[in-house]
Image (tube, rainbow, N blue to C red):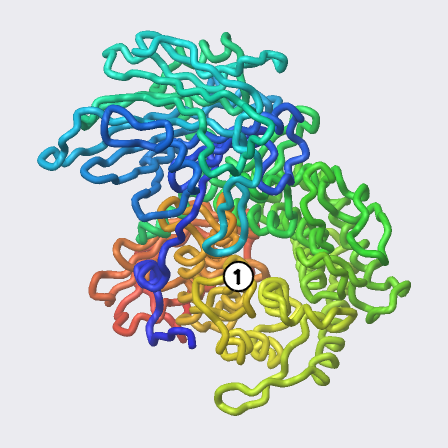
Amino acid sequence: MQHTTSIEWDAARALQEWPDQRGIWNTLSWRDSLYEFNVFYDGAIAASAYGAYGFNRRAFPEDQLMGFTLTPQFYLGGSVSHENASYHVRRGRYPDGQHRCSWADSKAPVLIVEKASGEVLFEQRQFAHVQGGRPTKRGDEPLFLWLRFTVKDVVDILNDVDRLTVVLTPQNDHISTSMDAFNNIILFNKPPFYPLPLDYAGPADLSGPGFLRAMNQEFGRRNRLAIPAQPKGECAVTWIPIKRFLEDNFEYAKPAILFEHLMVGMPCRKGAFFDVLLPFRQEDDETMASELALGFEGALSETKTFWARQLQTSTSIHVPEPYVQAHLDHYAPLSFMVSERHPQIGDPALLTGGYSYQGIWPTAQALQMAALERLGYGDAVASYLEIFRKAQGAVKPPSRHLEKHPGYFGNDPRYKAVDWLSDHGAILYAAGFHGLLSMDPAFLDKWLEPLVRGCEWIQEARLNTLHNGIKGLLPAGVANDAMTEEQQTWNDAWAYKGLSTTVLLLKRLSDPRWETLDAWAREYRETFQRILRQAVASAPTWTAPNGEKVPLIPTSPGEALPASLKHAFYLDTGPMVLAWAGLMAADDPIMRASVRWYREGPQWRLYRPYSNHAQAAVLDREISSCEPCYSWNIYHSLELGERERFSMGLYGLLAAGASQQTFGGTETREGISGTVFSQFTFIQLTMNAAIEDQTDELHLLRMLPLAFFKNGGFDWQHVPSAFGPLSLKAEISEDEHRLEITVEPPTRQQPSAVILHMPPFSFLESVYVNGSAASPSEGQITL
């Protein structure tokens, strides 16, 4: 059974409980670039327009065809055999503990991959760059990856070689990915050779730049990579081509297959290095020469300036736990590096992830954008919402019972991955949430009528009687990647969340239509609860460890398939979401039974930690065993004031659901990197724990973890809220006797009350608010 403790968790405790993930990768790109590089845990680099699953149907055909992977290896000694280098590429790459990844201490996203081998520590440092360091205008501007290979450290007393060899193996795009633990990176699912013959041009001693070029120039570009000149003459390049397609019986999977290699010999001396310039596409000589003239340091300087501007915001959030701070600092750049602009579309789009998920799941994007909103990137959110506004009414809902409707929000077909009926409510929620927190007149002028039409679609869809399911709910539709059409609670939860958020926005705007929409929302909630209670009354029961009979809460109160209860998505997209959505209260017996199933259910007998995500789902230390970001139970604990469970789940999102080295999210443990899934849930929960602004009152600090107050405390400045930006600062003394809080309440709109909740420190003796002594009453102070 899952581990429990009698005290709140913090980041250190979560990192102790959860081992790091192994086969991760990280996306490196330019904000709103059509292209992206993905760097795997061992330094392999994929320049793939098509992606692992082929969701990117916007990429130009020649870019898809010319997908490229560069695999670096390094060997002690001045030479390495062709056969040995090929063998190590061919045998596959598995995490062996020798590689570590990190981000450089820089505003620019500079990724570092280190490999320890024997007595030498070797570093591969890389960043993406667009010429001129300018924002994209079209999206297809040439994108480059600058790499620097450096001998970072040498144990001289053990070292007996004076040279080492770096082997760069060019291949076609040949990597696939999976949600499965231990099998999340799959090699050689495509022919490994680059589609065009390659050849090296340049001096062997790198007295001038060297180029790896495609010998066929039909595509108008030919440079596949370049090595800048090395003035000291310490490096030597050897190109080992192979004769392609020799015999009729040639087999790609032949065990003795030999690859092409670019071998660079360099001194085995601390500080020795050489650079490589890798364009995403083949580029012409003029473009390559212009970028080479800039050099590694010149390109890095432009990159730092660019990202400093992109990440500039009046909001600043500082917390005392370095691991948490790292996730907060990297959230925006990791999000922006999977955004794109297509020259034929114009508007930027925030994609779900890099490499695997180069499309859009709007339901997930709504949570991602809401987190960006709280961190002060509202302008970016507005820009990424625009494609959904333009697609309103143009997309058929994924339901056999529903036709196109001018109010329906769906995904732009060019970014389609898997359409869910929940997408409508999610887009409605994201746009309403941005309107509520920003109150931006220009945004509201464009969005207010579409939001109202979106609410009208929900009402009409609920009143639709042309189906065999239960009336009063949304008709059966796709709710997750299972692609089955059911009356899932998931779809109703998102529809209600979008509707209720729009109601709150209209009310704050004194728009008289809020009353009509509010009546729809109240009737929706009442109808849903009545139908769900009827379904639960006839649901099967299971026996809890204490002998109590507990109902198994249906994932759908209406038209559904029996297999839904068995699927791991039953946790992620099942009834637990209802408390977050507001359709059910967390203390409702139905919701308590829903969460209890995952904490105590009989499927625990079969559960294997850190294993396949598809096993019968449980809450392992309050984290979903399928997709950590959908641990809706943490919202229950937040609402119920369960501080131990809340902190366990909150910190577990970052320790169990993301890379502990590079702070990128994963969809499942070990599966599908290049995302920010778990982080967006963490950010929203943290903000909700500190700022409750969805009613007429403003409640502050009700459930913020105790660790946030210690070791210097936290300092949040100009954090967006539904009443306007606010600032919060708090620190508890080392002996936990004195608490000092500074509050700058929002001024855009006056709450009916501002209530400070005191953290439950056992020995708290005095409280100071804005420099003055305060006397809490029942753990609260009303400002």
Label 1 crowd (10 A; few <14 / some 14-19 / many >=20): many
Question: Hey, which quadrant is residue 752 in on the image?
Answer: bottom right
Question: Hey, which quadrant is residue 593 in on the image?
Answer: bottom right
Q: Is residue 440 above or below residue 128?
A: below
Residue 132 placement (x, y as % from top left): 47, 16
Q: Residue at x 50, y 66 (%)?
A: 634
Q: Is residue 536 above or below residue 770?
A: below
Regarding residue 313, the answer to whether it shows in the image is: no
Q: Residue at x 43, y 69 (%)?
A: 621
Residue 737 placement (x, y as % from top left): 24, 67
Instruction: For the N terminus, give its image quadrant.
Output: bottom left
Question: Hey, which quadrant is residue 357 in on the image?
Answer: top right
* Left or right: 713 as drawn, with respect to 594: left
Pick out the residue farthest to the left: 157
Q: Nearer the viewer, residue 715 or 40?
A: 40
Residue 9 placement (x, y as % from top left): 35, 66
Q: Nearer the viewer, residue 667 or 652?
A: 667
Q: Nearer the viewer, residue 187 or 635?
A: 187
Q: What amino acid is at disc 1?
A: His
Instruction: For the C terminus, give its image quadrant.
Output: bottom left
The tally of labels here is 1
Which residue has dot 1 on it?
A: 613
Helix, strand or loop at mark 1:
loop
Q: Is residue 313 above or below residue 591?
A: above
Pick out the residue farthest to the bottom: 547
Regarding residue 231, the answer to whether it shows in the image is: yes
Q: Is residue 474 above or below residue 100?
A: below
Residue 203 placement (x, y as % from top left): 35, 8
